[in-house]
Amino acid sequence: MTRQMVFKAAYFALRFGLGGAFVYAGVLKMLEPMLFAAAIDGYGLVSWDAAKTLARVLPVVEVAAGAGLIFDIRGALGLIVAQLLVFMGVLAWAMHLGLDVDCGCFGPSGLPPGITPPPQEGLGEVTKAMIRDAVMLAGGGLIYWLRRFLGVRPWPRGRGVGRLG
């Protein structure tokens, strides 16, 4: 297998992996918007009404951006990177405050609002979420680099959905 083919395979795998993760996370949040609103409220950054609105809007944006990345639509990668940076900022805020709340990243934990999971050995939930988001952000950077290296232009300016030069 040539080096070019390996890079093309990595490009597709990263797009489908990162895009699929966002679609999956968004759908899980759509299934339980009030539990996701409670997870947002746990950070104390917005009012309860704003948390309820965000719990309905954010999952739709996640699913749209994830699907856009899967189909290699222009702007989707930028939207995913922007979301990851915002999520990481919120997680950094939680770490600064010493919070160890359910991040709600892949749907709510199912615990009632105000109830935190019992402490466990190892990394806290917020730290795990920060590491996971950092890995996904690195994946987004690698996708960008592969686009430049392979000469890929996302659709609609490119030569078609997922087609390589």
Image (cartoon, grey):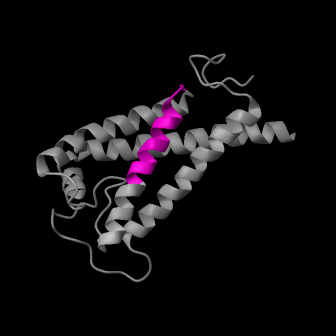
Location of residue 71 with respect to 82 vertically, above or below: above
Residue 80 drawn in magenta: yes
In the image, taking residue 16 as reference, residue 61 lies left or right, namely: left
Q: Position of residue 117 (x, y in %)?
A: 26, 73
Can the viewer see residue 71 in this picture?
yes
What type of secondary structure mainly makes up the magenta span? helix
Q: Residue at 24% across / 51% down in the picture?
A: 36
Picture quarter with the N terminus: top right
Q: Residue at 39% across / 36% down in the picture?
A: 63
Can the viewer see residue 13 in this picture?
no
Location of residue 5 with respect to 133 vertically, above or below: above
Q: Position of residue 161 (x, y in %)?
A: 60, 21
Q: Residue at 43% across / 76% down in the picture?
A: 123
Q: Position of residue 66 (x, y in %)?
A: 46, 37
Q: Position of residue 70 (x, y in %)?
A: 54, 33
Q: Quadrant of residue 43?
A: bottom left
Nearest to the observer: residue 56 or residue 134: 134
In the image, taking residue 12 as reference, residue 108 lies left or right, namely: left
Residue 102 drawn in magenta: no
Q: Residue at 39% across / 63% down in the picture?
A: 92
Magenta stretch? 73-87
In the image, taking residue 71 as reference, residue 143 lies left or right, namely: right
Instruction: Identify the residue at the far right of this view.
Output: 2
